[in-house]
């Protein structure tokens, strides 16, 4: 999918926002929902998605909402680094399929990094164990 196109209201993140698909939630307010990535590249890998938008990517998101959105991203990244005592953290966002985007609802990945551990593949494998994700989510929530 290219940068231009129509928003698909049946994408997995839209379904999660409507309560039609499950997630392991970290926090939610009137602006964002944060939850664990079902295909984590590292322990503690999570996502922050904006609510009340049909923006498929950053280029389509209203500029006047960026500050609030990225304040939530920063809040979660801080909690993740505290909860997992990681050596670094990737905060990343993809725009369009050629850039690596696979779900076309704006989202930011927060991925803890450890000096001597490689990242796991993001797709193609089996989803993570939900009990493990719940335990990790509890650690992050406690750090919030």
Image (spheres, rainbow, N blue to C red):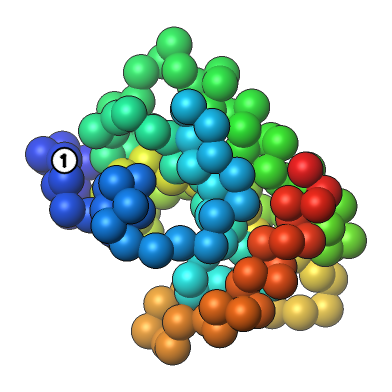
The image quadrant of residue 106 is: top left
Taking the view exactly as shown, the residue that stands out farthest to the bottom is 126
Residue plotted at (71% across, 68% down): 136
In the rendered image, residue 137, in percent from the top left (x then y), is placed at 67, 62
Residue 111 in sight: yes
Q: Does 51 appear above or below 137?
A: above
Give the side of residue 98 with respect to residue 136, left or right. left
Give the side of residue 8 with respect to residue 40, left or right. left
CA neighbours of label 1 inside 10 A, class few (<14), some (14 to 19), many (20+): some
Residue plotted at (56% across, 84% down): 129
Residue 103 in sight: no
Taking the view exactly as shown, the residue that stands out farthest to the left is 6
Residue plotted at (24% across, 33% down): 54
In the rendered image, residue 63, in percent from the top left (x then y), is placed at 41, 15
**Disc 1 on helix, strand or loop?**
loop
In the rendered image, residue 40, in percent from the top left (x then y), is placed at 56, 72
Q: Does 30 appear above or below 18?
A: above
Taking the view exactly as shown, the residue that stands out farthest to the top is 64
Q: Does 6 appear above or below 36?
A: above
> Which residue corresponds to mark 1?
7
* Residue nearest the viewer, comparing 119 with 138: 138
Give the side of residue 121 with respect to residue 87, left or right. left
Q: Quadrant of the C terminus?
A: top right
In the rendered image, residue 53, in percent from the top left (x then y), is placed at 30, 30
The number of numbered badges drawn on the structure is 1
* Residue nearest the viewer, comparing 132 with 39: 132
Give the side of residue 121 with respect to residue 55, left or right. right
Residue plotted at (56% across, 21% down): 68
The image quadrant of residue 4 is: top left
């Amino acid at each position: 999918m290219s940068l231009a196109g129509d928003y698909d209201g049946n994408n997995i993140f839209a379904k999660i926002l409507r309560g039609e698909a499950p997630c392991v939630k970290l926090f939610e307010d009137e602006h964002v929902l944060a939850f664990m990535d079902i295909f984590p590249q590292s322990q503690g890998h999570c996502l922050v998605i904006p609510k009340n938008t049909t923006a498929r990517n950053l280029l389509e998101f209203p500029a006047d909402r960026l500050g609030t959105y990225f304040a939530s991203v920063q809040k979660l990244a801080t909690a993740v680094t505290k909860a997992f005592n990681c050596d670094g953290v990737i905060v990343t966002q993809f725009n369009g399929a050629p850039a690596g985007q696979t779900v076309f609802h704006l989202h930011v990945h927060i991925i803890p990094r450890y000096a001597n551990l490689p990242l796991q593949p993001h797709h193609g494998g089996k989803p993570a164990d939900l009990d493990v994700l719940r335990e990790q989510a509890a650690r992050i929530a406690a750090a919030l």
